[in-house]
Amino acid sequence: MDNGKKDRITGYLTPLNRDMLFGELSPDFLRMMGGQGILSGIPVPISEGENGQIAVKSIVLDMAKVIGADPDFLYADKYMAYIKAAAGDQAEPMLVSEAAKLADEGRFEESCMLLRTALAIDPKSRAALYLYGRACKACYETASEDEDRSKGEAYVAAFKAESMDIFEVLTMMHPDFAMGYYFLGYAYLNLGLYLKTKLTWDDFMKYSSSADENGSGLDDNQLEDLRNEIQGMLLDLEEPVTIEKGCNQIMQGDFLGGRDTLSRFKEGRYENWWPLWYYLGVAESSLGNLDEAIADLKKVLTLSPSNTDVMDELAQLYEAAGDTVNAAKYRNKIALVHKNMELERAEQNLN
């Protein structure tokens, strides 16, 4: 799909078409399928239909998979022209329907291919955007649950990012479609973006009051279950949202306000979350409270012992206070951590 960004998943989809057979169709067959003016002399993917014969629908779907996997494929324009000619106004709905069937069978990557082609035909298609976001989500969730993690972290990260981007596009293009906000909220939550999660789920609650004309395929009872789920999640988000606001205050230069917002969380469920103490340290340092800043940053190191950025902050604070002994101590610790990391990398390379 062309969303103005580098295509992050084509490298994972293209190999799935490796075993496709390509060949030029005879003039008679091209005339029969209405492709003589488009596909003459062009190799096309060929697979047998349900009755063991070459079927036009099978060719169309395989073309769509090729384009969806690799939009820059040599004959992509020819394939797209034929798909539109063969299916007419039903090209995008047909691809969405077939993609939904593949997803129901657990063939999520193939579903992604068809949906990417559907979106090339109609970039604003709500159904294609919604199902594509969900198919990408299913891809990375399935890979994450795989015990041997055979597809790797890069695969998970690519499909996770693609899914989030698509749900963002969905909510922008179809702002009254509740389910876009439902899934986008969870994407933000997984990144620790609590304020964006809250605002996104607030929109879900706003647009999910009734299943009528919602387009999600859910009835009122199912939608109410999701509303109850998200209402509970919003209650759990109240403290994380406040903490994020405090961190944002500090990043924006309101050091006193940010410190006061975060100080209430020094005891309790967030006291062992090292970023809390880091932001408190930054605030105290910026307010000129060196002793308090040093104490907060030392607390960070009890929770994140190899954090060289915090060690560097401490060294700078000690230097500012004229304490060269402690400044040197933290500079030496930084050098030791870097040395140990290099040794670990060397050992991994040997293995």
Image (cartoon, rainbow, N blue to C red):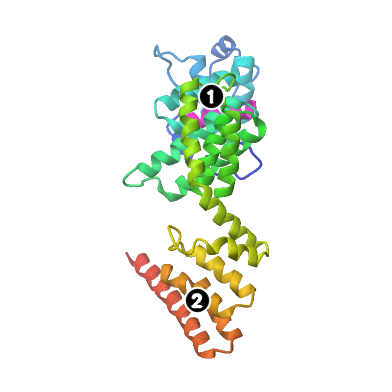
- Counting from the top left corner in percent of width and height, residue 89 is at 64, 16
Within-10-Å neighbours for mark 1: few <14, some 14–19, many 20+: some
Q: Give the range drawn in magenta.
A: 111-122
Q: Distance between the residues labelled 1 and 2?
A: 52 Å
Task: Please tell me in which quadrant of the rendered image residue 339 appears.
Answer: bottom left
Q: Helix, strand or loop at disc 1?
A: loop
Q: Helix, strand or loop at disc 2?
A: helix
Q: Main SS of the magenta segment? A: helix
Placement of the C terminus among the 4 image quadrants: bottom left
- Pointer 1 residue: 216
Identify the mark nearer the N-term, 1 or 2. 1
Q: Is residue 113 one of those drawn in magenta?
A: yes
Q: Which residue is drawn at 46% across and 22% down?
A: 221
- Counting from the top left corner in percent of width and height, residue 233 is at 48, 41
Q: Which amino acid does label 2 sit on?
A: Ala
Return the residue nearer the eye: 157 or 294.
294
- Counting from the top left corner in percent of width and height, residue 62 is at 50, 25
Q: Which mark is residue 295?
A: 2
Compared with 204, 33 (above or below) is above
Q: Which amino acid does label 1 sit on?
A: Ser
Compared with 284, 6 (above or below) is above
Q: Residue at x 55, y 62 (%)?
A: 262
Compared with 305, 195 (above or below) is above
Return the residue nearer the eye: 111 or 77.
111
Q: Residue 126 carries which label?
A: none
- Counting from the top left corner in percent of width and height, residue 1 is at 60, 35
Q: Is residue 17 one of those drawn in magenta?
A: no
